[in-house]
Amino acid sequence: MFEHLQPLPQDPILSLLGEYRVDTHPHKLDLGIGVYKDEQGNTPIIGAVKEAESRLLTSEQSKSYTAPAGTAEYNHLASALVFGTEHPALKDQRIISAQTPGGCGALRMGAEFLRGCSQKSRVWVSLPTWANHAPLLTGAGLEIAEYPYYDYATKGIQFEAMLQTLEQAHAGDFVLLHGCCHNPSGADLNPAQWQAVADLMARKGLIPFVDMAYQGLGNGLEQDAFGVRLLAEHFPEMLVATSCSKNFGLYRERTGTLFIIAANPAQAETAGSQLFSKIRSHYSMPPAHGAAIVETILADTGLTLSWKCELASMRERIQGLRQQLVSAITASDIEGDFTFIQHQFGMFSFLGISPQQVEQLRQDYSIYMINSSRMNIAGLNQSSMDYFVSALAKVLSA
Ligand code: PMP
């Protein structure tokens, strides 16, 4: 039977990484894959994570099963990080949560849960959105619809078009919003825009599904959670998927969280029973190590402080690189306005060059980014900045 299978193309980002690894160019630059990199181009283990791991090595007593939701302590601490300790939805016990295998696990389990709630609701996603959203959501059987978001001409959000399109959604439809650091565009809603989207969705009876994979890497841990917290105050029902891959640097440990907010504690408990049953039939329980690290950090004031400082320095490095890139481009022969880069958040921005120019950067200069020209700003550093800008100048003037 397997002889009838057709090979599928490799994920474009992963195949780009494969090409990059075998490239021998001394100045090669990987601006493709979405991981944070330091000034030396490494993705280091955060100090607080190392310390938590060494504590766990001596204190861990058992590898026995946990539960479909992971541990209660993890879920408690993760909720406080996302919603703050005083959020009314938490105090009213309207939130249930489950630790999941990464943000992907949270998104997929959220989609499975929503599909179980309604067979006819669609899920609206931004145009463009992260490439894995559609497979994760449609894989659970949800139908996708798109709302306009990033405007490639103005390099900002097409906010009016977004609202107009969402007016056409039906009551009970789900709307996927990026909590912060929109991937791939870096263009985030401002507080007034969050409020306007919330008003529209509440009026139309739409249900928010927020994906927040980069809390702390945009404007700050609290600032980045503004949209999630606002929606959670006003909506009786919503979902939030978060990830510890980037802000704790736990990528391969597969640690994320799915939160379901319901109208009251009884409905939250029932929703939880549905979710845990879905989890049980998919992977039974999440991997424990990454969650134990997060739990150890967040339960300890000293480790939390150390983690927050390191996260702040990662965020500031990205913001600094954004500014330096704009200054270097402005000082070069490159025509056009690239200042939008310094007004965007997180690791990604679209450079706004053509797929042919992206290809030329790769072939002639060993600079790797995906065809859409989404680049990982954190892949740059002081020594590669000039090389990158002069290569870009040559490609753009060709
Ligand atoms: N959502 C978005 C928008 C992302 O960019 C990512 C990571 N690239 C994720 C979710 C999930 O990440 P992970 O499963 O690695 O935690």
Image (cartoon, grey):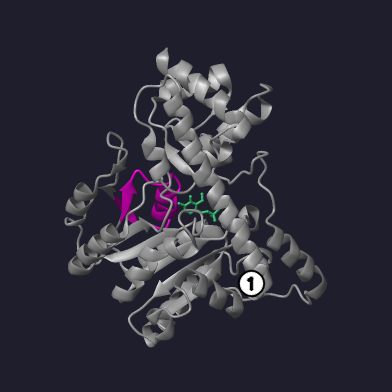
Beta carbon at label 1 within 8 Å of ligand 1: no
Q: Nearer the viewer, residue 70 or 65?
A: 70
Please report the residue visible at 56 percent of the width from the left and 59 percent of the height from the top.
102
Answer with left or right where residue 129 lies relative to residue 41: left
Reply above or below: 397 against 221: above
> In which quadrant is the N terminus drawn?
top right
Task: Find residue 249 and report its image quarter.
Answer: bottom right
Give the magenta-colored segment's residue range: 124-145
Question: For residue 131: magenta?
Answer: yes
Q: Residue 118 at what x, y percent from top left?
A: 30, 67
Reply above or below: 343 against 329: below
The disc labelled 1 sits on which kind of residue?
Glu
Q: Nearer the viewer, residue 270 or 360?
A: 360
Secondary structure type for disc 1: helix
Question: Circle 1 sits on which residue?
Answer: 295
Q: Is residue 286 visible?
A: yes
